[in-house]
Image (spheres, rainbow, N blue to C red):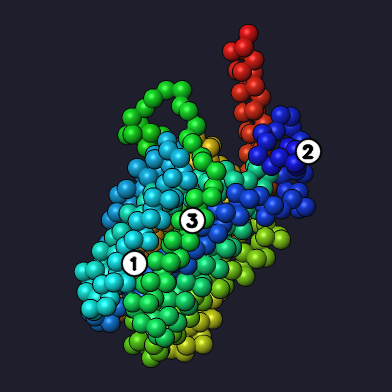
Amino acid sequence: MSESNPYESPREPEPLTTVARPSQSVFGLREFNLLLVSMTCSTIAGQALLLVVRFQVFEISNSALSLGMLGLVEAIPALSLVLFGGHIADSRDRRRILQATAIMLTVFAALLAVASFRGISIVALYAMVFVVGVARSFASPAYSALEAQVVPTQLIVKAATWFATVWLIAAMLGPVLGGFAMARFGATNTYGLIAGLYAVSLVTASFLQPRPAEPRKHKESIRLSIREGISYVTGNQILLGSMALDLFAVLFGGAIAILPIFAKDILKVGAEELGYLNAAPHAGALITMLIATRHPPVRNAGRNLLLAVAGFGVTMLVFALSKSLVLSLVALFFSGVFDGVSVVIRKSIIRLMSPNHLRGRIAAVSLIFIGSSNELGALESGVAASLLGTVPSVVAGGIVTLLVVAVTAWRAPRLRDLSLKRLAVEAYSREVAKDVIEASEETTDRL
């Protein structure tokens, strides 16, 4: 591939060392930088928004179940529409999708700021989370598909690592910013700040080049289009195994949704400390990501993925039994360290194993798993805390996570033996083969 034009399709195979050439930098790509900034602002805004909403819901209701219901309210639109969102991402201009969802979030965050003048209601808070779920169902497949389009094939692992790294920085800053602004300036100003961040994301996305969908040789219905994406994932043991591992580990092992209860009732701290607790896992994952940008986990990736998820389960057990703010922060920090390894490997798998015409739909299926683990996991956390008690519910979740790792290692041997380096070479070879076929078809058409 010519280094003077990073978007030029390769016309003949290069040495396999090109796949991981360390001197190539993704930050020399304008489109990569624009998408990164847009994603960063949107993530900071979204994480800050969720923290403030959770804090206010618990303040109004003083109920663990109400916190769990927030996850369900976001999951309903996010999970029911995301497959359609994946179809749209593969059939429409992905940049336009980002613009439309950013406008929606900016407007509704601004409306929430206005509503806060007279005292916010729990209904308005649930409504905002519902809107976030709708926006996510369309924006997330578009973001995921664009991530692999703005870099050449040989830089996909590096790009996936940097996207995950910066996302984690934003996810770490978001709760801290939300908690700090809420404590210092109140809900109205905090929601106004969040609306401003969404607006910056909108403006940045507008500078991306148009990304029209690839023309399809045969028209197909929405139902068949969605089924194609689902079939591709379910027929691939590595994709399905990595997604399922994340789903069940976070679904049962996570405790983020009920952190307000730990903060108020167990650790006896306020909104600002709650922000630190929310940010601690992201800080740990950030350290992992920064290391991965220099040393991508290309070898023994499957084994490392399983060990990382097991480590996550152990740290959640420590957190559940802690009554010290410092120990809780440390446990959450290391849960993020292990989760960071998982994120880098999982994102790289999806980018490397997704054909471009299916990227949106495969991302949508992935988001079904992630959304189920996060939003339905939040519901599970709230219900389990109501039935079993806060601490026992998290202990039980950590144990289930360890069992999930054992079953996955047994049932998915291809995932267990995965090497990202081998996947990168195979992906690069597919791109070269595709270019040769397209060139041959063009020559045939001219003749």
| Residue tagged 1 | 110
Amino acid type, label 1: Ala
Instruction: Return the disc, 1 or 3, that comes first in the chain's sequence.
Output: 1
**Gap in angstroms between the C-alphas marked 1 and 3:** 16 Å
In the image, residue 45 lies at what x, y percent? 44, 67
Q: Residue at x 29, y 60 (%)?
A: 130
Foreground of the two, 322 or 295: 295
| Residue tagged 3 | 203
In the image, residue 223 lies at what x, y percent? 32, 34
| Residue tagged 2 | 15
In the image, residue 250 lies at what x, y percent? 43, 64
**Gap in angstroms between the C-alphas marked 2 and 1:** 52 Å
In this rendering, the answer to whether 285 lies above or below 29 is below
Q: How many marks?
A: 3
In this rendering, the answer to whether 156 lies above or below 163 is above
Instruction: Return the disc, 2 or 1, that comes first in the chain's sequence.
Output: 2
Amino acid type, label 2: Pro
- Mark 2, Cα crowd under 10 Å, few <14 / some 14-19 / many 20+, is few
Q: Residue at x 34, y 66 (%)?
A: 109
In this rendering, the answer to whether 233 lies above or below 249 is above
Q: Is residue 97 left or right of residue 384?
A: right
In the image, residue 111 lies at what x, y percent? 29, 66
Foreground of the two, 252 or 287: 287
In the image, which is nearer the foreground, mark 3 or mark 2? 3
